[in-house]
Image: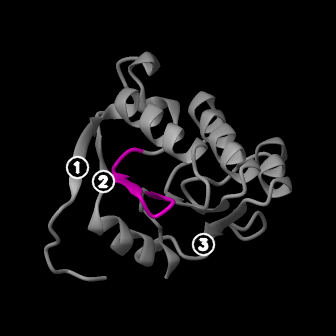
Amino acid sequence: MNLDWTHGNRLALLENGEAFYPRVFEAIAQARHEVLLETFILFDDKVGRQLQQALLQAARQGAEVHVLVDGWGSPDLPDDFTGPLADAGVRMRAYEPVSRLLGRLNLFRRMHRKLVVVDGRIAFVGGINYSIDHLAESGPRAKQDYALAIEGPLVAQMRAFCRA
């Protein structure tokens, strides 16, 4: 990854799921060529199902869709969640999947990335996972976090990082 400062980027700060989810889901649903998504947590809840629908829309429009989740952070996605994605051609993988027989083989290896790159034109990075606990409606235990929406030369670097 190029560590030199790049000029010409446009950044938007997104606070919590209320600002992040609509922007990222819209960008994914409008994808025409490629969606690269990496996340630590993806749950089968209201937010996860909205993401699933956006990914399905992108795949239906012909976009190549890749999803990488952490096996510890997203261990139990049911077949009715992952099946439609697989049927649509979404390539979904787990980093360090948890073995049902042996449990987690390496307790310290986790993939905490939260990256999305859509069509090489817009990217998102931050601390927000795909779960309802990043929305205020989840109550007093709702998580406070931020993400950036990025457009400009930095997106190409982020895409190359995800593809690697």
Determine which residue is flagged by label 3. 96
Q: Nearer the viewer, residue 72 or 5?
A: 5
- Quadrant location of the N terminus in the rendered image: bottom left
The amino acid type, in three-letter code, at marker 3 is Glu
Where does residue 84 sit, x and y in percent of width and height?
A: 82, 47
Label 1, on which residue? 11
How far is the residue under mark 2 from the one under mark 3?
Answer: 29 Å
The tally of labels here is 3
Tell me the CA gap for discs 1 and 3.
32 Å
Amino acid type at circle 1 is Leu
**Magenta part of the protein: which range?**
116-128
70 shown above or below 109 = above
Mark 2 or 3, nearer chain start: 3
Whole-percent x, y for residue 140 in the image? 35, 19
For the question of whether residue 57 can be seen, the reply is yes
- Determine which quarter of the picture holds residue 17: top left
Q: Residues within 10 Å of mark 2 (few under 14, many from 20)?
A: many
- Residue at the spot of label 2: 150
Above or below — where is 139 with respect to 105? above
